[in-house]
Amino acid sequence: MEVQFNDVSMTYDGSSRTVLNDMSFTIEDHSLVSILGPSGCGKSTTLMLISGLLFPSGGKITFNDRDVTRLDAVSRKVGMVFQNYALYPHLSVIDNIAFPLKMAKVSKKERMETAREFADLVQISDHLNKKPNQLSGGQQQRVAIARALAKKPSILLMDEPLSNLDAKLRTVMREEIRRIQQQTGVTTVFVTHDQAEALSISDKVMVLDQGVIQQSSTPMDLYENPQNLFVAKFLGSPSINTFSLDQIADALPERLVAQLKKKDVETIGIRPESLTQTEPGAGLFTGEVTHIEIVGKERTVKVKTADGTEVIIADIPVVFDVGDQVSFGSKPASLFYFDSEGIRMVISDAE
Ligand SMILES: Nc1ncnc2c1ncn2[C@@H]1O[C@H](COP(=O)(O)OP(=O)(O)OP(=O)(O)O)[C@@H](O)[C@H]1O
């Protein structure tokens, strides 16, 4: 099901604050789209507006070109999965999965067949007669997903579905969600504040801040081509280093600096993994190593420059100690430039 928002805005009753501002986007049929952003940016509100549990204050919502703006969740036939699973505690696994079909007056034989089929899909068939409190969190979430899918929803909506699981299980379950989504082809919208989750499973990620879409793109494009400073800073762990142009202008070619000034560039971003050690005094900056962290394959080094800026460097051979003076540089092509409004500027012949 293709979902479209056309200039949708949302102000909650009794509040004067606009939570979503003229939001427009298209979610393609059969795709998995994540909505990612900091707490309070409007992720759940967007999901509730897609579901029909909430109606917008303005704008139009369509499902496959059909106007559903004023249709409720039942008429939109959405499937929902929440953080707290919301299973019926007194029903067995199989009865939980079959419950929406019972409500839809599907015959017992058919609903049991369908429930078994979806229990198989989510790999919970060994526990069909257990009650939810006899299952682990991950197993309960499998049941909730099967229940949402059993009614063949127009779209599957998931609000922070993995938040209650421990780190290891989250990784397993996010891969499971991707597998199930690809196997069923159901259009899925997944709300999370965890970038690793969003980037690892989505066809597209919509990054929201303060009710405004900052960028909506493939995970790779978001990371490699952030359109503004917010997206550049929000994605990436450890996060991107930023310098003012004045801080590192002396280390850049004069012609490039002139170009950057002409384009009102104020901030330069460098990803931690784009920095490499240079000869002393060469490169973009020199500073003192304040911290070296080696966890398995991951290496993270912190360097403090003379003006007190802390720079993080990742994925480098560590051939120095805490307290050493070191210099680092980067290929000009790996630098990101942002103007005074935080908009990314692409400088054509910067390379
Ligand atoms: N029922 C409501 N009435 C008034 N304001 C609300 C209501 N629900 C949410 N809000 C406000 O709308 C804004 C967006 O909330 P929303 O729950 O959509 O954000 P979110 O990105 O999902 O946040 P989180 O990650 O913390 O769940 C917040 O400022 C919140 O306080």
Image: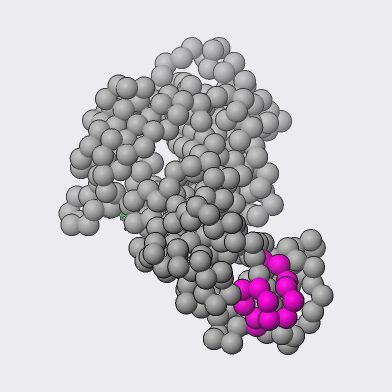
Residue depicted at 49% across the width and 69% down the height = 257
Residue 121 placement (x, y as % from top left): 64, 26
Residue 23 placement (x, y as % from top left): 30, 43
By secondary structure, the bulk of the magenta-drawn segment is best described as: loop
Along the line of sight, which residue is nearer the eye, 226 or 157? 226
Q: Is residue 5 above or below residue 308?
A: above
Residue depicted at 32% across the width and 35% down the height = 5
Residue depicted at 46% across the width and 25% down the height = 29
Q: Is residue 78 above or below residue 341?
A: above
Q: Is residue 169 above or below residue 5?
A: below
Residue at the far right: name it.
319
Residue 128 visible from this viewpoint: no
Residue depicted at 60% across the width and 37% down the height = 177
Which quarter of the rendered picture does the C terminus lie within? Answer: bottom right
Which quarter of the rendered picture does the N terminus lie within? Answer: top left
Query: Magenta span has 277?
Result: yes
What is the magenta range? 275-287
